[in-house]
Amino acid sequence: MAAGNRHRKRRLDPDDDSDLDRDEAPEIHEVDLHGCTIEQAERRLLAELTRCRAVRQSPVRVITGKGFGSKGGNGVLKPAMTRWLHGPKGKELGVTLIREVNGGGALEVRIDR
């Protein structure tokens, strides 16, 4: 399977959201962007969030990694995706919340349904 083409669903970690009851944690769609360039990641994120919004699936976990494999150890993917989500495309898709989860290696994105 090519990098960045993995789809997974996991249970949302109730510890990440105090509003959720442990027994009622919804499944969360994951988009893994490891190995993508910024341009590839933007296209993939647009497609995935468009699909998730159409089927009313929120939140979505966007896995960017922490950037430890990047030159100098500073990742570029998470900051770029955060800017993109806060920008016009994110607004167009109905993004209402973006927060770091999984120790900073992922973003939880909530979409207005």
Image (cartoon, rainbow, N blue to C red):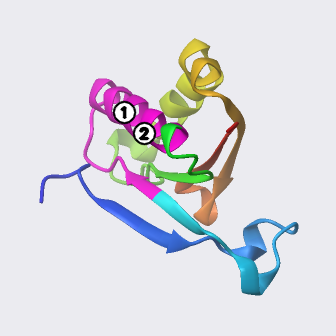
* Disc 1, SS: helix
Residue drawn at x 74%, y 67% is 16
- Between disc 1 and disc 2, the foreground one is 2
Image height check: is 37 above or below 109? above
Residue drawn at x 48%, y 59% is 29
Q: Amino acid at mark 1?
A: Ala
Decide: marks 1, 2 in contact (CB < 8 A)?
Answer: yes
Residue at mark 2: 51
Q: Quadrant of residue 21?
A: bottom right
Disc 1 crowd, CA 10 A, few/some/many (<14, 14-19, 20+): few
**Front residue (pair 5, 82):** 5
**Magenta residues, as a range?**
30-53
Image height check: is 26 above or below 50? below
Residue farthest to the left, as pictured? 1
The quarter of the image holding the N terminus is: bottom left
Instruction: Please indicate whether residue 61 sits to the left or right of residue 77 in the image.
Output: right
**Front residue (pair 67, 20):** 20
Residue farthest to the right, as pictured? 19
Disc sitting over residue 47 in the figure:
1
